């Protein structure tokens, strides 16, 4: 659970909206702040064997809001075997 600071000018979901990452769960999850990590992973996946565990990646800029983090953790991270 996350708490939001009650300060004037802070983030408000009613006016600012919430970003929810729509991603199916995978066995391996890569959380990164580097676009190049995601690009390298995308290139490498094509060379992995067909029976390799499923891999997902998410950019941390998409997980800045407490509701976004909670939603992603419940739907994706909770089902992962490995989180990097």
Image (cartoon, helix red, strand yellow):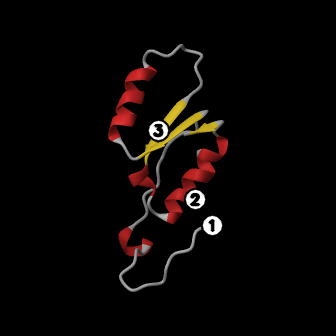
Viewer-nearest residue: 22 or 5 = 5
Helix or strand or loop: what does disc 1 sit on?
loop
Helix or strand or loop: what does disc 2 sit on?
helix
Q: Kindly identify which numbered label has been placed on residue 63.
A: none
Residue 77 higher or lower than 13, as above or below: above
Residue 11 higher or lower than 44, as above or below: below
Q: Which residue is mark 3?
A: 57
Q: Kindly identify which numbered label has been placed on residue 70.
A: 2
Q: Residue at x 53, y 31 (%)?
A: 55
Q: Earlier in the sequence, mark 1 or mark 2?
A: 1
Q: Quadrant of the N terminus?
A: bottom right
Distance between the alpha carbons at the discs numbered 3 and 2:
17 Å
Q: Residue at x 59, y 52 (%)?
A: 73
Whether pointer 3 and pointer 2 mark residues with C-beta atoms closer than 8 Å, the reply is: no
| Residue 64 x/y as whole percent | 44, 60
| Residue 66 x/y as whole percent | 51, 64
Q: Residue at x 56, y 74 (%)?
A: 3
Q: Residue at x 53, y 13 (%)?
A: 49
Viewer-nearest residue: 53 or 33 = 33
Which quarter of the picture shows residue 53?
top right
Viewer-nearest residue: 27 or 84 = 84
Q: Earlier in the sequence, mark 3 or mark 2?
A: 3
Within-10-Å neighbours for mark 3: few <14, some 14–19, many 20+ = some
Q: Which residue is mark 1?
A: 1
């Amino acid at each position: 659970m996350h708490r939001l600071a009650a300060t004037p000018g802070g983030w408000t979901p009613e006016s600012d909206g919430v970003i929810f990452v729509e991603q199916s769960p995978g066995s391996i999850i890569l959380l990164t702040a580097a676009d190049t990590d995601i690009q390298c992973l995308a290139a490498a996946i094509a060379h992995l064997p067909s029976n390799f565990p499923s891999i997902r990646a998410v950019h941390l800029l998409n997980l800045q809001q407490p509701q976004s983090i909670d939603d992603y953790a419940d739907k994706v991270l909770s089902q992962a075997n490995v989180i990097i």
